[in-house]
Image (tube, helix red, strand yellow):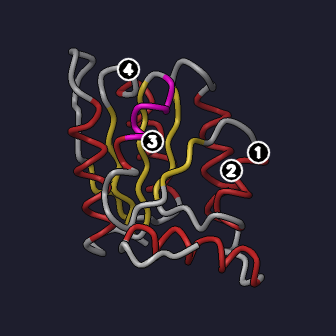
Amino acid sequence: MIVSIGADHAGFIYKEPIKEHLAKKGIQVLDEGTNSDQATDYPDYAFKVGNRVKNQQADLGILICGTGVGMSIAANKVEGIRAALLETEFTAESSKTHNHANVITFGSRVNTIDEVLKFIDIFMNAKESDAIRHVGRVEKINKYEEKKWEK
């Protein structure tokens, strides 16, 4: 598995511990930056990570900013990306099982690093549901994005 990871200045503090956590599991990590706590723009990293996933250069994207919201919004602008903000164990599991998320976002000012690492593990161990209702909903999103959706 290959994971692309990016953070802005607020998320930088969590990036290295996440990379170490993934490396211990034998997961290859592509670090898209930032590399300091100097102010920077979160969309730059969200677009880099989103495009890595879109272009199948990474299997999963992980993004960290202060709240996780900005990264989620920006990543979802990349075609084919289903970014989910994870703040609880439930969202960590259901974003994978129900929504087939391919990018996950976190807020360094919302959750502790221990919580974030737990949520990553829950997400990665969950399986995408093949239940018709979940697959159908994801397909609706895909069709809408491709401008082929009809109500």
Range of the magenta residues?
Answer: 67-73
Tell me the CA gap for discs 2 and 4. 21 Å
Query: Counting other residues with Cα less than 10 Å from the Cα at mark 3, is it few (<14), some (14-19), or many (20 or more)?
Result: many
Kindly identify which numbered label has been placed on residue 89: 1
Q: Do callouts 4 and 3 mark residues in contact (Cβ within 8 Å)?
A: no
Query: Counting other residues with Cα less than 10 Å from the Cα at mark 2, is it few (<14), some (14-19), or many (20 or more)?
Result: many
Residue 65 versus residue 119: which sits nearer the camera? 65
Q: Which residue is mark 3?
A: 72
Counting residues from the N terminus, which is met first, the one under dot 2 or under dot 4?
4
Q: Position of residue 112 (x, y in %)?
A: 62, 25
Q: Do callouts 2 and 1 mark residues in contact (Cβ within 8 Å)?
A: yes
Q: Nearer the viewer, mark 3 or mark 2?
A: 3
Residue type at the position of mark 2: Ala
Tell me the CA gap for discs 1 and 3. 18 Å
Q: Position of residue 41 (x, y in %)?
A: 23, 27
Q: Position of residue 8 (x, y in %)?
A: 30, 28
Q: Which residue is mark 4?
A: 10
Tell me the CA gap for discs 2 and 1. 5 Å
Q: Quadrant of residue 36?
A: top left
Residue type at the position of mark 4: Ala
Secondary structure, mark 3, is helix
- The answer to whether residue 24 is left or right of residue 39 is right
Tell me the CA gap for discs 3 and 2. 14 Å
Kindly identify which numbered label has been placed on residue 92: 2
Residue 113 versus residue 89: which sits nearer the camera? 89
- The answer to whether residue 87 is left or right of residue 4 is right
Residue at the location (30% across, 75% down)? Answer: 56
Q: Do callouts 4 and 1 mark residues in contact (Cβ within 8 Å)?
A: no
Q: Nearer the viewer, mark 1 or mark 3?
A: 3
Q: Is 119 included in the stretch rendered in magenta?
A: no
Secondary structure, mark 1, is helix
